[in-house]
Image: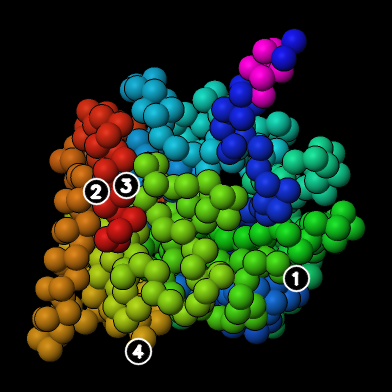
Amino acid sequence: MKIIIILTTLFLISLPCSASPKSSSPNIVLIIADDVSAEDVGCYGCPGIKTPVMDRLAATGIRFDNGFVTTATCAASRGSIMLGRWPHSTGMPELKAIYRPEIKEIETFVERLDSMVKSLHENGYYTIHRGKWHIGGAYPFNNPKGIFSKSFDTVKAGNPKLGGEEDWVSALQQRPKNKPFFCWFASYDAHRKFTAPKVHLESDVKVPPYMPDLSSKKGYRSRADLAKYYDEINRLDTSIGNVVKELKTQGVYENTIIVIIADNGRPFVRSKLYTYDSGMRVPFIIHWKGGIKQAGTVSKSLVSTIDLAPTFLEAAGITIEGTTFQGRSLIPLLQEDSSAANHPFIVTERNHHVWEAHERAIRTAEFLYIRNRRPEIQRRGADWADDSSMWHLRKELNGAPMPQEYTYFFSPALPEELFNVKKDPHQLKNIIENKENEPVLQKMRTLLSEWEKQTRDTAPKKLTQHIWNDKKWGYPRDKKAFNPESNKLGDQPGWNHLKNSSDEELRKEAAYSRKNF
């Protein structure tokens, strides 16, 4: 009997301590808005929008003014958040990843990568998914099963006619009370189609300078469209308030990390899909009453959504050394100095999403540089509704000259662009031809080239082409403006490198990225 007791004791001692998180391990609630730019939240300077809950959480937490997604397209962005890697390093950089003929290869590859939820689940967290899923490749739309089936204890597909937040509170109520928990709460707000109750008036709206302020009584009204978008954000804000209230009721609010982000910018022209700040810069609010040293501050540090997985793991006491995460933990900014430098620069991508594309952008605190390997193609948004203000503008002009600030939409993109974001926050004036900016331009080119080399990014000659045509989607029959192509899949950026990389190579590359980028 003594021998049995001793052997049992030794066995229990030998079990990995990570399987039983400390009672003080923080709970984590990640809230992902759908298609919301940072500039459309009250605390980020939007004067007419009603977002009191997000504003309060920012005022008592940390608001990151330079928070970016890795790509302004939904599926690839969400996969990047989950895996803590740049899109071209996930095997799923495109919207259509799930339809690819090599999908089984991609699934096998993704299974080799570390994941935010899988890591937390394997270390004792109760993990919940509610609302929109929409991650490509190994993560089927609205069905987070497959290689992560054990990571998700509860799953329910959302309803796009609602906000996707309708059962967040009940999910919290039904969780086991003896485990720390992680919630992937993803709304459909503010994705089109807009269905939220009317809260905002046209007079509340702030029209961005790169969008025409049309007000035709019979045609398109920019402010009316944006007001409906504001209503979606308000519905999300109300749902976040309900989550906060439930956390307080359960007595776990102070030990819960609440993070509010979006998967990409607003569903309007020059935002979603674009590599400008309007597409890539999103609300990035972290609230942790028991874990933020400088609460109530605004951080100018450059942060990315690939930083969330390392942040959550470090907060839970799980090491990120030897993992495939490429992001950097934000814990030093939360618990030491919120103004500390995090990344020397942020890199963002645009790959196929409806349109053939290959752009890479590098963003520092002062400059934005964009390299476009498909400059002959005009940039477009995700669908006609997103771009509708521009089509209506052209119709109303009826052949009259187009105002200079809107010609970008009807002209082929340039191979390179450079903007001074401090002097030109909306990136309206391309300064790449100015000779005095040559040293900055060369530096940005070098930084981006080094990042591409070290992360094994590639620009295949044969990229996935346009998938829409004017007959099906109602775009104007103007082939010069539209350039429709066949629905033929091309080569994915980075994929040939990824599928031939060993686990050791992937970990080494990730470690290099965490240290240098």
Question: Looking at the magenta stretch, what is its main secondary structure?
Answer: helix
Q: Amino acid at mark 3?
A: Ala
Q: Which mark is residue 455?
A: 2
Tag in front: 4 or 1: 1
Helix, strand or loop under label 2 = loop
Q: CA distance from mark 4 to mark 1?
A: 31 Å
Q: Which mark is residue 510?
A: 3
Determine whether, in the image, residue 92 is placed left or right of residue 504. right
Helix, strand or loop under label 3 = helix
Q: Which residue is mark 4?
A: 423
Q: Which residue is mark 1?
A: 53
Q: Amino acid at mark 2?
A: Thr
Task: Tell which of 45 and 117 is nearer to you.
Answer: 117
Q: CA distance from mark 2 to mark 1?
A: 38 Å
Helix, strand or loop under label 4 = loop
Q: Amino acid at mark 4?
A: Lys
Mark 3 or mark 2: which comes first in sequence? 2
Q: Is residue 124 visible?
A: yes
Q: CA distance from mark 3 to mark 4?
A: 34 Å
For the point 29% across and 38% down, which residue is it? Answer: 506
Helix, strand or loop under label 1 = helix
Q: Position of residue 264 (x, y in %)?
A: 50, 58
Mark 3 or mark 1: which comes first in sequence? 1
